[in-house]
Amino acid sequence: MTVRRMKTYTGGQGYVYQYYFVGKRPALPGQPDAPATEFIFDVTSDRKTTYAVSVFLPEKAVVNWAGTHGRQLNDAEQYGAAKMRLFQGFDDIEDMMTNGRHLLIDSAGLEKLLAMLGVQ
C-alpha cells in the first residue's frame, strides 16, 4: 500500500486545500490537449469530499520551451510546473470542484511557471 503525503495550500479565494500527487500518465488520445502529459492530484477543501484535478502539459509547450532554452525539461521541472499550475487554480478559481478539474499549461504559462521556480 502506498502512503501518500497530504500537503496543504491556502488559496487566494480563502479556501484551505489539502492535496497529494497521485501520478502522471500520457493524456488519453481523446483529450483535446493530447498529446500531453496529465499530472493527477487528489484535492479536498472540506476534508469530506476528495476529487481529482488533472493538469495537462502539452508536448507542444515542452518542445517550445526546449527550443527557446536549448535543453529539455527534466521530470522534476515538469512536475514543478504542474504543481505551480495547480496552485494558480487554487488562487484563481473559486469553486475548484466544479470549475477547476481540468487545468492546462500553455507555452506562455509554462514559461511563467518555470520562471517563478527559477528554472532557466
Image (cartoon, grey):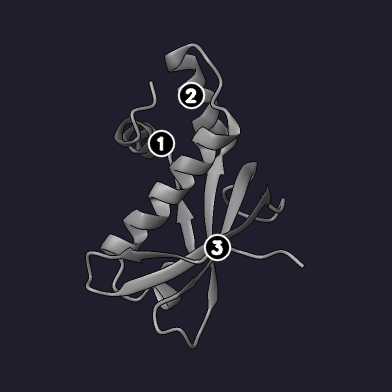
Q: Which residue is mark 2?
A: 64
Callout 3: SS: loop
Residue found at x 61% / y 51%: 38
Callout 2: SS: helix
From this view, report whether residue 107 is shown above or below residue 29: above
**First reached walking from the N terminus: tag 3 or tag 1:** 3
Q: Which numbered tag is attached to residue 16?
A: none
Q: Which residue is mark 1?
A: 110
The answer to which of 10 and 67 lies nearer the viewer is 10
The answer to which of 111 and 118 lies nearer the viewer is 118
- Kind of residue indicated by mark 2: Asn
Q: Quadrant of the N terminus?
A: bottom right
- Kind of residue indicated by mark 1: Leu
Q: Residues within 10 Å of mark 3 (few under 14, many from 20)?
A: few
- Kind of residue indicated by mark 3: Arg
Q: Which numbered tag is attached to residue 5?
A: 3
Q: Is residue 101 visible?
A: no
Residue 111: horizontal and vertical position, in percent?
A: 36, 31
Residue 59: horizontal and vertical position, in percent?
A: 59, 34
